[in-house]
Image: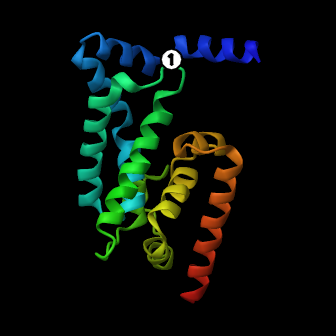
Amino acid sequence: MVSALFDRTKQAAFDEDLVLVERFLAGDGSAFEGLYTKYYEKVLTIARGVLMDSDEAADAVQEIFTLVYRNLHRFDRRARFSTWLFRIAVNRSIQQARRFRYRSRTVELTEALDRPSPAEEEVHIDPKVEQTMAKLSPNDRALLVLFYWEELSLNEIADSLGCNINAAKTRLYRARERFRVLYEESE
């Protein structure tokens, strides 16, 4: 166990994100720009997937990075910065989705992906998939986005959601099941 903790501490010492965090906290504003540039697209993808609206997602991203900027001194340097950031992104996006839950929001999943295909062809997603995603709760959409679009491991999802790996696995399973049921109902 001590060996594992030492390995994690050693790995964190060489973590580029941690170097940028330390530089920012020492007064180098350009270090935050580096973190912003590195993670902007991933945070935007998470926000779009949860909120299902590009404009709301863009607003959420600005609020997320403002929160990170103001609270970076609270970041526990033993953890990965990306995990901490994704947790803030998911929580903030879910909060915003709850605020606007009565408004109908849809966005094409290809826009939520915001990534060109390897052949640079437009990816066409089944409209039923888009409609089904829009019917899911923000929590379920967050799980599916983290797992399928951001391709995070269950361990990383658990860290991002602040739960243990078994809880993340269970929540993901239930989100998939709710998606399946809603998808089949629309047939």
- Pick the quarter of the image with the N terminus: top right
For disc 1, the neighbor class at 10 Å (few under 14, some 14 to 19, many from 20) is few
Measuring from the top left, give residue 181's x and y in whole percent: 62, 80
Q: 84 or 54, which is in the foreground?
A: 84
Say which amino acid is labelled 1: Asp
Q: Is residue 38 left or right of residue 55?
A: right
Q: Which residue is mark 1?
A: 15
**Residue shown at the point (25%, 44%) measured from the top left:** 63
Q: Can you say whether 141 is above or below 157 in the image? A: below
Measuring from the top left, give residue 129's x and y in whole percent: 50, 74
User: How many numbered circles does the render carry?
Assistant: 1
Secondary element under disc 1, as helix, strand or loop, is: loop
Q: Can you say whether 37 is above or below 64 in the image? A: above
Q: 118 or 127, which is in the foreground?
A: 127
Q: Can you say whether 172 is above or below 27 in the image? A: below
**Residue shown at the point (52%, 42%) measured from the top left:** 160
Q: Is residue 60 visible?
A: yes
Q: Please, which residue is most extreme toward the front here? A: 74
**Residue shown at the point (26%, 30%) measured from the top left:** 70
**Residue shown at the point (42%, 59%) measured from the top left:** 49
Q: Is residue 120 left or right of residue 162?
A: left
- Pick the quarter of the image with the C terminus: bottom right
Measuring from the top left, give residue 47's x and y in whole percent: 37, 53
Measuring from the top left, give residue 29's x and y in whole percent: 22, 18
Q: Is residue 76 left or right of residue 39?
A: right
Q: 187 or 50, which is in the foreground?
A: 50
Identify the image's colour scheme: rainbow, by chain, secondary structure or one colour. Answer: rainbow
Q: 75 or 133, which is in the foreground?
A: 75
Q: Is residue 45 visible?
A: no
